[in-house]
Amino acid sequence: MNGALALAAAYLVGALPVGFLVARVFGVGDIRRHGSGNIGATNVLRAAGWVPALLTLIGDVAKGYLAVAAAGALAGDAGARAAAAVAAIIGNCWSVFLGFRGGKGVATGLGALLNLVPWAVAPAIPVWLAVAVTTRYVSLGSILGAACVPLGALLLGYGAPAMLAALAGAAIIIARHHDNIGRLLAGTERRLGRGRSAA
């Protein structure tokens, strides 16, 4: 029973549409009607500026982290925490509050996996930064950063539940970037600061 409650709580926390709410507070209206239509920090940055984007990023990371922490408090076992990490990412990507639509899971996944497999996440952050800063492709940085986490979890010897959660989380995040991958391969993906992108 506690395990089911932990999963439901993790999903609902992950589903909180932080970017959508922040954009409304800053007078942007429905962020889904701007730029890429995504509710994440990158699109909030383009539509509303650095402060709302930073608030969105912090909020999304925090909700992922707290979802796993709450699962640990409710159920206590490694399996529940691992499942909660995936549930939080799913909540972000398919939010019940937005008609089962949402973001791409990057920041929420960062927070969830930072709680679950912190040392595996550590190298993914500089990978994301290096790629995003040098290429200005936020989507590419997100994809490569996500791919680093399950590899790090495996190499660092995290338990099977955590490794599977890291793999599932990375798979969801990468799959949510399928349009970006197509544009990257076609050479038509827009760079940060150079117009519209769906990152």
Image: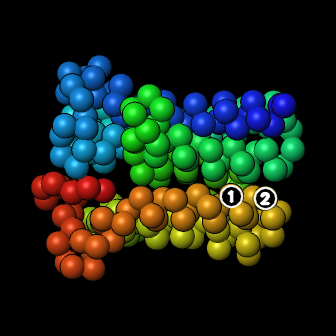
Q: Nearer the viewer, residue 139 or 4?
A: 4
Disc 2 secondary structure class: helix
Q: Nearer the viewer, residue 97 or 64?
A: 97
Q: Is residue 114 above or below residue 190?
A: above
Q: Which quadrant would residue 179 be assigned to in this image?
A: bottom left
Q: Which quadrant would residue 152 be assigned to in this image?
A: bottom right
Q: How many marks?
A: 2
Which mark, by number, is residue 161?
2
Q: Position of residue 167 (x, y in %)?
A: 63, 65
Q: Is residue 161 left or right of residue 7?
A: right
Q: Amino acid at mark 2?
A: Pro
Q: Is residue 33 visible?
A: yes
Q: Position of residue 111 (x, y in %)?
A: 58, 45
Q: Is residue 113 left or right of residue 132?
A: right
Q: Which residue bears the numbered disc 1?
A: 165
Q: Which residue is found at the position 79% from the left and 44% from the top?
A: 80
Which quadrant of the figure contains the C terminus? Answer: bottom left
Disc 1 secondary structure class: helix
Q: Position of residue 126 (x, y in %)?
A: 49, 64
Q: Which residue is found at the position 81% from the left and 64% from the top?
A: 160
Q: Which residue is found at the position 72% from the left and 48% from the top?
A: 83
Q: Amino acid at mark 1?
A: Ala
- Furthest-right residue in view? 77
Q: Which quadrant would residue 101 be assigned to in this image?
A: top left
Q: Position of residue 138 (x, y in %)?
A: 33, 60
Q: Is residue 91 above or below residue 17?
A: below
Q: Which residue is found at the position 73% from the left and 51% from the top?
A: 82
- Disc 2 and disc 1 in contact, CB within 8 angstroms: yes
